[in-house]
Amino acid sequence: MIEEIAHNIYQIRVPLPKNPLRELNSYLIRGKGNSLLIDTGFRQEECRRALFDALHKLNVNHDKLDVLGTHIHSDHIGLAPEVVGHDKKIYLGLEDFRWSTSDENEVYWKLMDYRYLEEGFPREELQQLFSLNPAKNYGPILDLPNYDYLLEGDILEVGGYNLEVIEAPGHTKGMLCLWLADKKMMFTADHILFDITPNITIWPNMEDSVGTYMDSLKRFKNFPVEHALPSHRETGDYFARIDEILNHHEFRVQECFDVISNFPGLTAYEIAGNMTWDIKAKNWMEFPIIQKWFAIGEALAHIDYLLQRSQIKSVQTHGLKRYYKMK
Ligand SMILES: [Zn+2]
């Protein structure tokens, strides 16, 4: 469960029970004074036990522990407030910091519910969802003075290393990766994952998340990375994986465009139902509701990409948005 990756750098696998991601890879950079923990797991007992056990085995002094949340998803920062030293920091990217400390976060679920209804998501399914979504239940306490933000190019000195902050918008607007030039090592967070595709969805604070993500991925080809350290599952060939993910989104954009061209006037809910998904269910109607919720978000992000480039348009009738190919 704990693996030493390099001198003073450890990977801690934190289980994510009942979650298709299975585990979170948390990384500890242990220093003589301060140490830094990158990501934590959900605010949930199984995660808490695994993380605290590992930190105990590694003799980490909690009073001197800073936390870096690569982004605001609850599997990454759920336990940050419990594990951070009393006077130490929980670092986030600027945009995720803004998001987590503003009203946007509070109204997010209401905005999303409204948006999903408009995009054809059935009201009954949305109500059932309320109790299921881990982000609503296992997220961190946000009202603390420990939160602070980092910007592109900031350097964190810890464990004898200089870690450079690299902004990687797309999966969230404020996603951060860390570049360790000495070791040609990139902590890729959820920006580049190897055996699952990072979920790209719609955000009230980010237009064109797919386009933004693809631009950001292309930029990551400029780093001479030899070791990629992702937040979930295993590592792999960094450059080949970037190309695969770029191809995946080009394919998804095309698939979305083809559905809209072939069946004009569908809602996003119906468009998603006509796309291909790597989920074990006989058909769209039998998808678990939570998976449907993620699927719609992903479909909408690709629809947004086409809207931004004037390849399709939306028309609102009777409170529902319907999509058509541009003539
Ligand atoms: Zn995430």
Image (cartoon, rainbow, N blue to C red):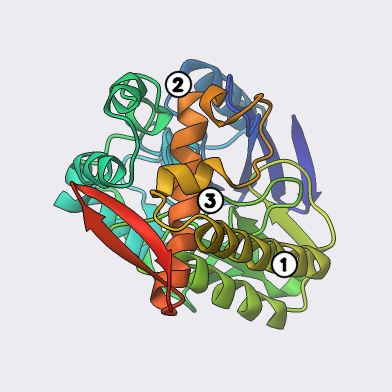
Give the number of the disc on residue 44: 2
Quadrant where the N terminus is found in the figure: top right
User: Distance of mark 1 from mark 2, alpha carbons?
Assistant: 36 Å
Q: Position of residue 147 (x, y in %)?
A: 30, 51
User: Distance of mark 1 from mark 3, alpha carbons?
Assistant: 35 Å
Tag 2: residue type?
Gln
Residue 246 relative to residue 275: left or right: right
Q: Quadrant of residue 246?
A: bottom right
Give the number of the disc on residue 22: none
User: How many neighbours does mark 1 have within 10 angstroms: few (below 14), some (14-19), or many (20 or more)?
Assistant: few
Q: Which badge, 2 or 3, comes first in the chain's sequence? A: 3
Q: Nearer the viewer, mark 1 or mark 2?
A: 1
Q: Quadrant of residue 12?
A: top right
Q: Which badge, 1 or 3, comes first in the chain's sequence? A: 3
Q: Position of residue 129 (x, y in %)?
A: 36, 24
Residue at 20 percent of width and 52 percent of height: 104
Residue at 56 percent of width and 63 percent of height: 177
Mark 1 lies on residue = 247
Does the Cβ of the disc 2 residue fall within 8 Å of ligand 1?
Answer: no
